[in-house]
Amino acid sequence: MSLKRLAKESLIYGLSGYISKSISLLLLPLYTAVLTTEDYGILDLLSTIVVVSTFLILSGTDTSVGYYYFRKEHFDERAEILISSLYIRLLFSAAAFAIIYLFSGFISDLLFGKDLRLFVIITGITIVFQALHSFLFNLLRLEFRMWLYTILSSINILLSILLTVYFVLLKGMGVYGALLAQLISYGLIFLFTIYYVFSRYKFRFSYNWSKKILSYGFPLIGTGVAVWILNSTDRYFLAHYLDLSSVGIYAVGAKLSNIVGIIGGALQLSWGPYAMDIQYEKNAKEIYSKVFQLFFIFNVILILGISMFATDILKVFTQPDFYNAKAVVPFLCASVFFSSAYFIVSIGINLTKKLQHTIWITMSAAGINILLNFILTPLFGSVGAAFSIMLANFVIFLLTFILSQKYYKIDYKYKVIILLSLPAILIISISYYFNLMILYRILLTAIFCIVSLGYIYNNYKNSEEFKTLKNMLFRKNNNEKELDIKKE
């Protein structure tokens, strides 16, 4: 099986991510003009609660369902698998909301040092809706309904943005308005999910499948706790050692770095079902290797570009209070890359059902992140926090890579990785240290991109995908020439 299908699916999935991040970036000038750095910090801390709670609610069920869904021997039981996992999701999300509601006062004091219980409770309700939102879009990926995924995702994104503009900009409701916009947009998807799932699969709950799903994903519950620690530590340390304004500035830097997630997120969404589906192909390992190499090259180019021009981007899209976010961008970009690359290289662990390793790997990384934040955040502020999360995600990537290779060896091209990584790190370091003029930054970035894309051309020009694209282009040009001749 060629890479054409994966490329097509990644591109389609990437549309929603591209729309989300593009519109979000375009609206950044308005948000930073209306919201203070402290407001941004509050929103960012609340968003981490949503993200990490979703990890805990999932409890590995997405991975578990993906594994059983594509096993040949279980094709006739797909409805029971899906509905059973939905009930698990509903139960866990309800429990999460109950805990957040009961301890809303404590959470508010811990995070913000003041009474913002209403914000915490609204976030708790949003978590329930978000859990069903993620279930629906995971189901659409399993069904390979890419266009419906993109359409619904785009509608959800646009609705959220429009509601945010209305509540925050027009009504001046600040943080409360931003939270209300998320609540409504996710709530509508929640209702659609219930209708879509039960109208297609009915109420086919299976107690036995519930046990199997939880049993397979159980090791990932510990991983979920570790991920909560890993993804929240930097913000909490900044809020503790500095202030909420520092968290807000850091959040803007994270928003820029999330542009890297367009490639990683799109591939990640299509990768799980695709990787499992081709596991029986003879050239599966070769495809896995090619995917990682191309993923790596395009991400290095993107990280370099964002890091080199972070100052210019911030000056265009934000206010002066947020310009200091430049310092954390390279580290957070690298962190996003390692977090995305982990999903690709973990194929060996997933195929061999060695998910128990993800517990100690993620917990080790979380421990490293906490230790580094204790040391580096008081000394270097947001840069120390960004470096800590980057190194922690690198540890997850590296350990996962080593173990996955142990159980399912794939011939990755290590030489290319080293030859591209070192120059990129050197170029970014020189640019930041000497504060290079934009002309020099453009020149260095252009040279790196030409070399990297030249490598792709030289190594993939004889591939099936490249030949197909070339034939299509030449056929188009030939057709145009024939039309011109006939006109004459």
Image (cartoon, helix red, strand yellow):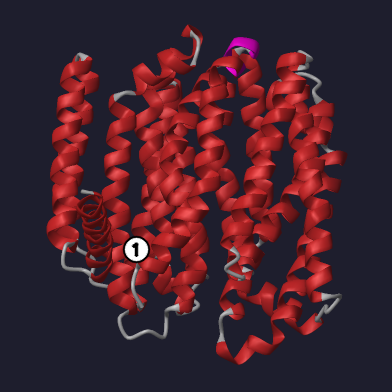
Residue ID at (15%, 41%): 450
Q: Residue furthest front?
A: 488
Residue ID at (35%, 17%): 312
Residue 390 pos. (x, y %): 39, 40
Residue 236 visible within the image? yes
163 in relation to 269, above or below: above
Camera-side residue: 205 or 231? Answer: 205
Left of 56 or right of it: where is 331? left
Query: In which quarter of the view is residue 438 placed?
Result: top left
Residue 218 pos. (x, y %): 64, 69
237 in relation to 440, above or below: below
Q: Residues within 10 Å of mark 1 (few under 14, many from 20)?
A: many
Examine the residues drawn in magenta and state their main secondary structure.
helix
**Quadrant location of the N terminus?**
bottom left
107 in relation to 299, above or below: above
Query: In which quarter of the view is residue 283 placed?
Result: bottom left
Left of 163 or right of it: where is 365? left
Residue ID at (48%, 46%): 367
Q: Which region is colored magenta? A: 31-35
In what element is the residue under mark 1?
helix
Residue 149 pos. (x, y %): 62, 56
**Badge 1 amino acid:** Phe
Residue 89 pos. (x, y %): 76, 61
Camera-side residue: 402 or 312? Answer: 312
Q: Name the residue under label 1.
A: 401
